[in-house]
Each structure stands twice: as C-alpha cells, then as structure tokens.
Image (cartoon, rainbow, N blue to C red):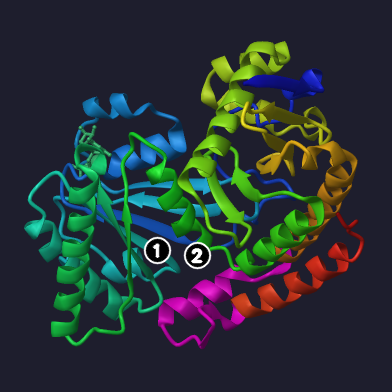
Amino acid sequence: MSFDLEDEASYGVSFPTGFEYGPDEGDGETAASSEVKPRILLMGLRRSGKSSIQKVVFHKVSPNETLFLESTNKIVKEDVTNSSFVCFQIWDLPGHLDYFDSTFDAENIFGSYGALIFVIDAQDDYMDALQKLHVTVTRVYKINPGIKFEVFIHKVDGLSDDHKIEAQRDIHQRACDDLIDAGLENVHLSFYLTSIYDHSIFEAFSKVVQKLIPQLPTLENLLNILISNSGIEKAFLFDVVSKIYIATDSSPVDMQSYELCCDMIDVVIDVSCIYGEEEYWLGIESNRSQRNAIGRDDSIFDTQSSSVIKLNNGTVLYLREVNRYLALVCILRVDSFDRQGLIDYNFLCFQQAIQEVFELRKKSKLPDMAQNNMLGNDVQVNGLSTEQNHVHEDSKKASKQASNNWARN
Ligand SMILES: Nc1nc2c(ncn2[C@@H]2O[C@H](COP(=O)(O)OP(=O)(O)OP(=O)(O)O)[C@@H](O)[C@H]2O)c(=O)[nH]1
Ligand SMILES: [Mg+2]
C-alpha cells in the first residue's frame, strides 16, 4: 500500500484541533443554542455497555479502557454539537433507576424528539433485558409515539457468527411478540448487532443519527449525483470527530468499505498530529477547553486539503474536507482517479450544495418540529414530519440548483 499526502502543509489544519465535542459553538455555522436538539437516550440494564458506547464513539476512549468504567449513578447528559447536521444530546440513563417512578419526570425525559437506544448484553442471559425493554417501550410510546426505538444487541464480539444471527433472530422475535401481545404491533423496533471492539458500533450509531437528520434524502441525492458524474464507486459523508457517517450514496454499504474509510480518517488525524502545525499539535495535547478554543478559528481550516491513499488492489481512497467537521471519503478505481480534475470540480459543486443545505437548516425551525413530535399529533409523510418535509423540500431545491453545474464523467 502506498500512501500519498497531498498538500501536506494543510493537513495540520484540515481537521478540528480538538477531536472532541464541546459546548455550543456559538458561531454562525452551528445550530443556534436556543434550538431544541434531538435527544438520544441510552438505556438498558446495568453493565450492558451504555457508557462504554458513549465513551468509545464520542470521546475516542479505546475499548479496553472501558473495562475500568464505574457504574453510572445518575443521568449523564452530553451535548454533541458540531456541524448543523450533527447536533443532538445524548443522555446516559443508568440501568438501576426506574424512570417511571414518581421521583422522575418521565414526560420531560422521554417527551422530546429523538431516539431511544436500548442496549442488550448478548453475552449475558437476556430475558431480564427483554422484559425491561418491553416495559420501557410500552411506557415511552404512550408518552411519545414519535420517538424512534433502536435496539443494540451488544457485546457480540464474544459470539460466533451463527450465535450472533441466532441471538438477533431470537431477540427480534420475542420483543415483537411481546409488543403484539400488548396490542402495540404498530411500534417499530430496529435491531443492530454491535460491539465496541469493531466498527459495528459506529455503523449502528450512524444509522440512528441519520434518522434524526431531516435533510438525509437530499444529502443522499447529492452523493448519488456526485458519484455517478465522477466515476466514484462509493462515497461517505463523515462526521470526522465521531467517525459516524451522516449520509452515503444509495449503493449498499459494505462493512469493509466503511472500515477502510474510518481507518483513513484515523490515518489522516494521526498524520496531522505528527506533522501538523505546532499550534495544532499543542491543541491536541493541551487541556480540552483550550483545544476547543483553538479549533474555532476559521482561518486555520483549508478547504483545499485532501488525502489520497492508493491500495495495491487498484483502489483509491480519496478524502476531501467539506467543512471544518465534515469530510467526504470516496472509494474509486485507480483509472477513474486519472480524471482527478473532474472529480475535484464536481466536489466543489457538492460542497457548495451542502453549504446551501446548511443555510436552510439554520433557517428551519426544529423547536416546532420537536414540539409537534412531543405531542404525538404531527402528520407523518414518508417517515418525515411536516416540518421535516418543508426542510427536505427546500433543501431539495437548493441541491437541484447547485447540481445543475456538475460536469459529467
Ligand atoms: N466484550 C465487550 N464488553 C463490553 C462492550 N461494551 C462494553 N463492555 C464492557 O461492559 C462493562 C460495562 O460497561 P458500562 O459501559 O459501564 O455499562 P453501563 O451500561 O454504562 O452500566 P451502568 O452504568 O451500570 O448502567 C465494561 O466492563 C465494558 O468494558 C462490548 O462491546 N464488548
Ligand atoms: Mg454507565
């Protein structure tokens, strides 16, 4: 494998200095702090792995370090706010508390627009977890029918492939049967096999986050136009800090491609740390608040920066920064990369279209949307709420305008 670094000087400045989420940024690019952010609730029995998931995905803690995590004893809330697209709160709800008890305000905890991730330890006997899942889903659905229920069948690293499939089938069947028995056949649960020891947790989180991005169809559409006009086989739009992808083109995602792209982001970040500017390096090492402060300076981000990795099987990985937090990572054949000029031109069109969708998002009214969902009286069309559809329609127009300029392959 050969590794080309293009525009090496710009590497040090191509990613946020602190690879960590901070409080609201307060700059024009992020959603306003007054905006009600979608909420992702992590729930499940004690020791099922909730805090570990949060630490590994959003704090770059290595999986082995989670062995020493202490049990959480109160609700831990965290803001994940970087770009306008990736903007939500994560609440880690420890497993030993009863949130439907009168000491908690369940309406407040579960009433918000967002998703509930229920984590089940697949290495343990999961009957108690299924029981708790059932109670949770039935109670929460009554409070907030708009919430998305996601079930992580977790710690599957300890299971053989056959065992994984069997666990998923069994859990899926039992959970859905219980809901049907309770007359809740309309409630939809999504299931994922996850582990913090591989990329599966990032993939699952990507899919959960994508459901909370109303502009997803527009982003996918833009990626489709980009790849079909540029001879690219697969493209992911990544949130660099967490390595979750917020959108990809409509061709199926194969886990290996996703892993390769994640690894590329890691390589670029590592190279940036070693060869980047001193200020940047210091930013990584210094305390977290300082890191975030340094990362806010617009001038240190260079939209020209990019990275190319040529694999010995004739495949090229091409990374371009879209804005300070989002990167496009493409997989293409080496012959298609001969027309790099065309790819770069189309990338600029793509970048401009994303910018326009960003602008629209800033003008959109998420609080109203959250409110509607909370009351459970919103009209859903194609899985999007009416407000979301407005955002989607407006952003479709923006993307169409921008995509008229694209060059053809
Ligand atoms: N093998 C394996 N172990 C995991 C995985 N995820 C978490 N663990 C381990 O599970 C244990 C419990 O993890 P925690 O994240 O503290 O569990 P929790 O759900 O937050 O527990 P409470 O805070 O008590 O509710 C830790 O020792 C983790 O290392 C995984 O994907 N695979
Ligand atoms: Mg915990």
Q: Which residue is mark 1?
A: 115
The C terminus sits in image quarter:
bottom right
- Residue at 23 percent across and 55 percent down: it is 165
Using the rendered image of the protein, determine whether residue 329 is visible from the camera's viewpoint: no
Q: Which quadrant of the figure has residue 39?
A: bottom left
* Residue 281 spot, x, y in % from top left: 64, 15
Quadrant observed for ligand 2 in the rendered image: top left
Mark with earlier residue (1, 2): 1
Local packing at callout 1 (Cα closer than 10 Å; few below 14, some 14-19, many 20+) is: many
**As rendered, which of 200 and 31 lies closer to the eye?**
200
User: Are circles 1 and 2 on residues that touch, CB within 8 Å?
Assistant: yes
Amino acid under disc 1: Ala
* Residue 287 spot, x, y in % from top left: 53, 20
Q: Which residue is mark 2?
A: 211
The N terminus sits in image quarter:
top right
- Residue 386 inside the magenta-drawn segment: yes
Task: Give the residues drawn in magenta, as a range.
Answer: 362-387
Q: Which quadrant of the figure has residue 218?
A: bottom right
Judging from the image, what secondary structure is the residue with disc 1 in? Answer: strand
